[in-house]
């Protein structure tokens, strides 16, 4: 059985925030970073991105690298994702508009109170109550 060794680390530094290859270096801390998002997080001290977001950024970066290496190939997955995202946003906007219309309709002024016999009956009840109270005293 042959012993296996871990691969040697690459000479190119990686960003501690995004996990992408670092293209820049912070002049104050000399920490390598990949983009403006990483630089902002380095300066504010918020730390690295969550692991799932780092993996998504790395996957997107490698898709970009492959597209640059193979210029004739279209970026279908990214285009499809952007179209789906736009469709979801439009659907949510439409749902929000419909919800706002329903809410606005339910907030309309209530119908006026009936001015007919009901008010007259109440007036009679109040008058009768006053008469009874005046007679009791």
Image (cartoon, rainbow, N blue to C red):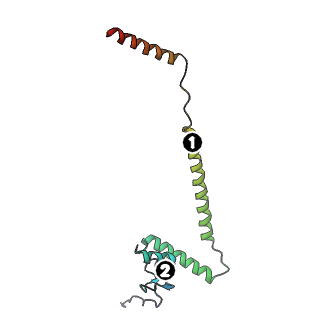
Q: Position of residue 94 (x, y in %)?
A: 60, 51
Image-based side of 35 in relation to 50, left or right: right
Residue nearer the viewer, 124 or 5: 124
* Mark seen at residue 28: none
Image-based side of 79 in relation to 122, left or right: right
Instruction: Please say if the residues under marks 1 and 2 sit with CB atoms less than 8 Å apart.
Output: no
Residue nearer the viewer, 105 or 73: 105
The residues tagged by marks 1 and 2 sit, at their Cα atoms, a distance apart of: 48 Å
Q: Position of residue 19 (x, y in %)?
A: 46, 79
Q: Position of residue 8 (x, y in %)?
A: 42, 90
Residue at 48% in and 89% down: 12
Compared to residue 63, the image places residue 2 above or below, namely: below
Q: Residue tagged by mark 2?
A: 20
Extreme-left residue of the structure: 137
Residue nearer the viewer, 120 or 131: 131
Residue nearer the viewer, 101 or 51: 101
Q: Disc 1 on helix, strand or loop?
A: helix
Residue at 51% in and 85% down: 23
Compared to residue 30, the image places residue 119 above or below, namely: above
**Quarter of the image with the C terminus in it:** top left
Q: Disc 2 on helix, strand or loop?
A: loop
Residue at 48% in and 15% down: 121
Foreground mark, 1 or 2, reads: 1
Residue at 53% in and 25% down: 113
Compared to residue 56, the image places residue 34 above or below, namely: below
Image-based side of 126 in relation to 77, left or right: left
| The quarter of the displayed image where residue 70 is located | bottom right
| The quarter of the displayed image where residue 66 is located | bottom right
Q: Position of residue 135 (x, y in %)?
A: 35, 8
Among the two numbered marks 1 and 2 on one chain, the one whose residue lies closer to the N terminus: 2
**Quarter of the image with the N terminus in it:** bottom left
Q: Residue tagged by mark 1?
A: 104
């Amino acid at each position: 059985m042959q012993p296996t060794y871990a691969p040697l680390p690459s000479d190119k530094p990686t960003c501690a925030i995004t996990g992408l290859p670092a293209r820049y270096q912070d002049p104050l801390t000399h920490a390598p970073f990949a983009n403006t998002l990483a630089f902002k997080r380095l300066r504010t001290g918020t730390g690295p991105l969550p692991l799932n977001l780092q993996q998504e950024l790395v996957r997107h970066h490698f898709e970009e690298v492959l597209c640059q290496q193979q210029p004739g190939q279209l970026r279908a997955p990214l285009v499809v994702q952007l179209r789906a995202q736009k469709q979801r946003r439009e659907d949510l906007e439409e749902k929000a508009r419909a919800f706002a219309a329903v809410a606005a309709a339910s907030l309309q002024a209530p119908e006026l109170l009936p001015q007919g016999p009901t008010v007259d009956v109440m007036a009679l009840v109040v008058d009768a109550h006053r008469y009874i109270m005046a007679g009791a005293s």
